[in-house]
Image (cartoon, coloured by chain):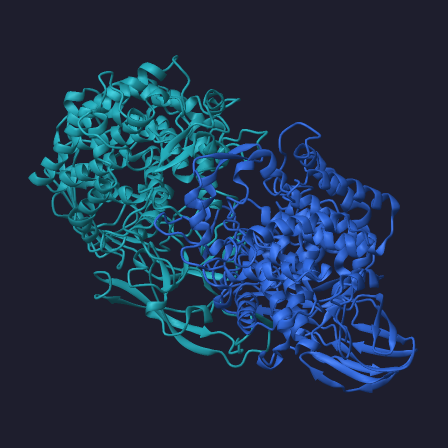
Chain colours: A cyan, B blue
Amino acid sequence: MPRFTDPSAIAMVAVALLFGSRAATLEEPRDLLPAADRLSPLPVAAVTIRDGFWAPRLEVNRTKTLDHVLEEIEGTGGLKNFDIAAGKATGTFGGPFWADSDVYKWLEGASWTLATHPDPALDAKVDGIIARIAAAQQPDGYLDTFVQINVPDLKFKNFAFFHEDFSSGHLFEAGVAHFQATGKKTLLTVATRMADVFDREFGPGKKDYIPGHEGIELALVKLARATGDKRYFELAKAMLERRGQKPSIFEGQFKQLDANRTVDFLGKPLRIGEWYERFYLKDPKHFDTRYAQDHLPVREQKEAVGHAVRAMFLYCGMADVVNETGDAGMWSASKALHDSVTLHRMYVTGGIGPSEANEGFTADYDLPNENAYQETCASAAMVLWNHRLFNVSGDAKYTDVMEQSLYNAVAAGVSLTGDLFCYATPLASRGDFKRSPWFGVPCCPTTIARFLPSLGQYIYSRSSDGVWVNLFIASEATTTVDSGKVTLQQTTKYPWDGDVTIAVQPDAPSEFTLHVRLPGWASKPTLRVNGAAVTPKIVRGYAAIRRQWKSGDTVNLTLPMDVQRLAAHPSVLQAQGKIAVRRGPMIYAFEQADNAVPLRDVALPSAATFKTALDPALAGGVVKLTTEGVQRDAANWDGLLYQPITPAPAPKRVPLTAVPYAIWGNRGLGDMVVWIDASR
Amino acid sequence: MPRFTDPSAIAMVAVALLFGSRAATLEEPRDLLPAADRLSPLPVAAVTIRDGFWAPRLEVNRTKTLDHVLEEIEGTGGLKNFDIAAGKATGTFGGPFWADSDVYKWLEGASWTLATHPDPALDAKVDGIIARIAAAQQPDGYLDTFVQINVPDLKFKNFAFFHEDFSSGHLFEAGVAHFQATGKKTLLTVATRMADVFDREFGPGKKDYIPGHEGIELALVKLARATGDKRYFELAKAMLERRGQKPSIFEGQFKQLDANRTVDFLGKPLRIGEWYERFYLKDPKHFDTRYAQDHLPVREQKEAVGHAVRAMFLYCGMADVVNETGDAGMWSASKALHDSVTLHRMYVTGGIGPSEANEGFTADYDLPNENAYQETCASAAMVLWNHRLFNVSGDAKYTDVMEQSLYNAVAAGVSLTGDLFCYATPLASRGDFKRSPWFGVPCCPTTIARFLPSLGQYIYSRSSDGVWVNLFIASEATTTVDSGKVTLQQTTKYPWDGDVTIAVQPDAPSEFTLHVRLPGWASKPTLRVNGAAVTPKIVRGYAAIRRQWKSGDTVNLTLPMDVQRLAAHPSVLQAQGKIAVRRGPMIYAFEQADNAVPLRDVALPSAATFKTALDPALAGGVVKLTTEGVQRDAANWDGLLYQPITPAPAPKRVPLTAVPYAIWGNRGLGDMVVWIDASR
């Protein structure tokens, strides 16, 4: 299929840009799709979501979350920062260093919303904010209001912690989203001017630079694809390839800084040296840059370490380079890192990063439940990363993880009301957990605001030979195949029901392949085409149905939705002797709100069977699971913290109900567990 | 029995001092012993320890730990600080704010060592250090080398964090120990001069003062008892009674400080405001003093909160006031706090304080294993506190906890070699835990050094009607009863064997009560006197054997040493479905060193039975436990982190060995668990 290199031709579609280096197909690893066969997502604007699970959430995001988030941003001075930098207002900088990024993330979310829901009022609001941003940009293109207002002499001088890179990355992503959603280049121009600053200063062959908080790399690739300007891609690649030097670029720069100088951080003075000491200099004799994944050259990284969001964004950039160049070293590292995350360091909810201390990874199999950090930003970034790995491999193993994170960790990151968010997202609660409307560091609310409206792009993909159905979300999508336009109409009550109907409607009869994902969690999926059972070739977890498609053709996928009791690898000490419950893509949680017996006193028989029933009154309709648990030993614990085990009397059977983890914590405070104790 | 109020009469014995307010016996709570009946420990010097468990540890402390600790203190400038303050040396202050306290703690340990092991070389070394300390004391009596060297203008200006109180408390304790051990008043005089400074500034009716790191209160009571000077007791009581004001004294003082001024902390500048923000101002709108137990007046405190060592030291001071005055409010609060700790917030090892973030308490039943903080200082302080509560109540429930902490959490705090220490002491390890020779904040090594040589005082007590045997440690002790001197000779292989023989040898036949503790963990203890079974009255867990004792009388206590499988309260989520193993006072741990099967793959049948065998080659001889475990489901976990539970094949039985937690981590790196998964 054609790829676009002429910016004038691309306008509203998101595509991958083909650069010359892609020609070296023969040397590329076998599990990488040949360059010409790699996948492109269908653009956000091309997909209309109508399902019962996501559509209401997207509507809440559109009508409630965007306003709420913008109000909170304004309340902390996030917009006014631009006016101060522009010399149009006076006052002090508000929010954390990277306050600009939250404005950009809001703009990205608003843009994706405009892509599917044209709205003149929102469009005008977006234009107004973009104008304030543009006014703050320096004549040379530089834009970072924290640095401009508070520490102009420290421009590009504190890579490790000032977030010029991170904020700019979100500017670039917002600029591209705004351009693709509206066709306007106002924000895209601000973005390219700042990208040009980075390129002039730090482009290939110029000053060494590595981002302290990664994210700009993947954003530069987006910018390159949207503008056709290869410089931005080369800059991203250079940033990736500079990582892991000894001594670290961060270390060299730290030595140039006055560690005792203080800068404002959320209204308090922060000593510049403090964060270096906390994250890079725990052992004062040894500079350790694992926190920001600068410990090894990226092609040598095999283990997911450090701050989880930084790691995900870095890995996204690596996957983008793989996509553009077929880089065997980055692909090999990407696969090792994916194994590290998914085989050793990922919650059953698809979330990552168990520790608050570094907001990130700890050790293999260390997955605490009560105090799981599992930051919402990291969960959303798991979707971004796995989507990119899928794009280059066509392998459903990545789509499976994408779906796992999406339906569980990401979905749980925001309340049903759309105005309360998880920063940390525990897998068990003693009844003291609740979501918050905002945070001093508000990255997670703005992540939700930008991520949800972009959901459409993950559902379908295109490749040289046809169309791909990745997620089962009732929706309509239009794309092109060789013979012309084709519309896919997906009807399903997924995730509550495993029947998926895909109506294929090409403008004219046409031979192409419809690739339909067979989820790894489904034991025996079946497929029918126009009512007749088919057994197409299955390639990397996707059924490849190649035929002459004509309007009116219908594909039926049936996924058995049995309730599965999951065990964790025995090395996950925190889940030993415990059971998690999964149905379809949904991980379930036991909440006190549904259970009369105190959750702390109950266990689940290993052979428990479940009944399923749709509760239309809960969260817009979810499937609840009911079973029989065992109320644990009736030993009297009054006045005792520990006591010898006594022979249990006949176990008392009690009813137990579980609800999707995605909707937990929406009914007031109460105990919750994902991993429930197995009875013995 | 007589109490001593004349300092000239007390010399070498540790006693509680009776102040006038004790007269109000009739109003005292019923579960408090009448003033005249409260217990006094036998002094350290009066007890010779000969047992197989503790005597080797005390010998290692005497011959290795003391030298090692002093060397490390010197290496960080802890002694030189005094020379600099005295104007006899130049240089910069070394160590944390409270570096003086480590020197005092070493002196206390050395003094208790001299009390039982006269040693002219050690005596001279102690004298030399005391001379350097005395030289640093200001003419007005003030002594705190950090303040003197670095921030003389901030004397008594930063209660919440500068440790003038904490360090002085250890000075007072060391001064008393040195005086009681050697009869010399050199250090005691330094102590009383500094105590006089506190009294002049902050005595009753003078300026409000509450210690930021408690400990000085209990030390002032010791000083009062050793000198007979009631002012010190009244100062301690005033400090306790001033706690919990609104707004907090800390808050008022914080407002006077320049929060942005930096002070040296371990060689780096620390902004004064930083720690306030971290511990008291997490929510910037609200000053929260729970960290230092200043949230409520002490008589209203019912829940153990904040920094665990601070809490324990505060509670010790409260118990001392109860002892001296029968204060009903403090006794009632003490009991509530004891319930809070032992029924909701204590590890099965008797350790406390699960969280690193505040080095302290979190929520009820929150007792994580892998990342348990369980600071060694807090474990030792549990012994101090429970001992004091026992002194005023005669209740074995306190001695039980004292023994539990002592034989498990405290014992595990130091390596068998005596030169490696736990700061945090986890209850499970993934093979990456090891003790350290020293820490930037080295409180735990100096706690071990001062605590172990003082062990003798916990074994026996005296009361108005006789002598008490609290701990079963082979030893000899001499004390007085009404008719004169009596020697107790305790012979036992405890904790490995439950047979305890106590030879009672009064100088002359004499009627008194021998109170023998019947441990709460022992199901059916039996007692014989001169070979004949006796069934004396049991009062609060102690058998009260009253008779005419004559030389040659022998008491035999037999404690059944069955292996017990313990469960935790169901609300301790981290121990749900798990079993801990106890034999006698010892909590056992499963270490990889003893087990061929990976510990992560093994579970313990709920009905497991154990064989016991003394392993003379391990740690000087310990009882090992062996049993049969179940190697968990043979499911293939290759390439899987989670998978559906499959019907288990016939479980594979594997041998399992456990060793006392007290000696874990002495054989290289390896996995360890206290709470082992129960098989199902």
Q: Is residue A347 visible?
A: yes
Q: Is residue B520 left or right of residue A583?
A: right
Residue toward you, A391 or B129: B129
Residue toward you, B573 or B138: B138
Position in image of residue B44 (x %, y %):
79, 60
Q: Residue at x 38, y 48 (%)?
A: A350
Position in image of residue B259 (x %, y %):
43, 39
**Quarter of image, res B379:** bottom right
**Quarter of image, res A582:** bottom left
**Quarter of image, res B326:** bottom right
Residue A158 sits above or below residue A360 on the image? above
- Which quarter of the figure is the N terminus of chain A placed in? top left
Residue B312 sits above or below residue B129 on the image? below
Position in image of residue A665 (x %, y %):
32, 59
Position in image of residue B444 (x %, y %):
65, 48
Residue toward you, B511 or A581: B511
Residue furthest to the left: A120
Q: Residue at x 22, y 62 (%)?
A: A621
Q: Is residue A203 visible?
A: no
Q: Residue at x 27, y 37 (%)?
A: A102
Q: Is residue A56 left or right of residue B658?
A: left
Q: Is residue B138 left or right of residue A661?
A: right
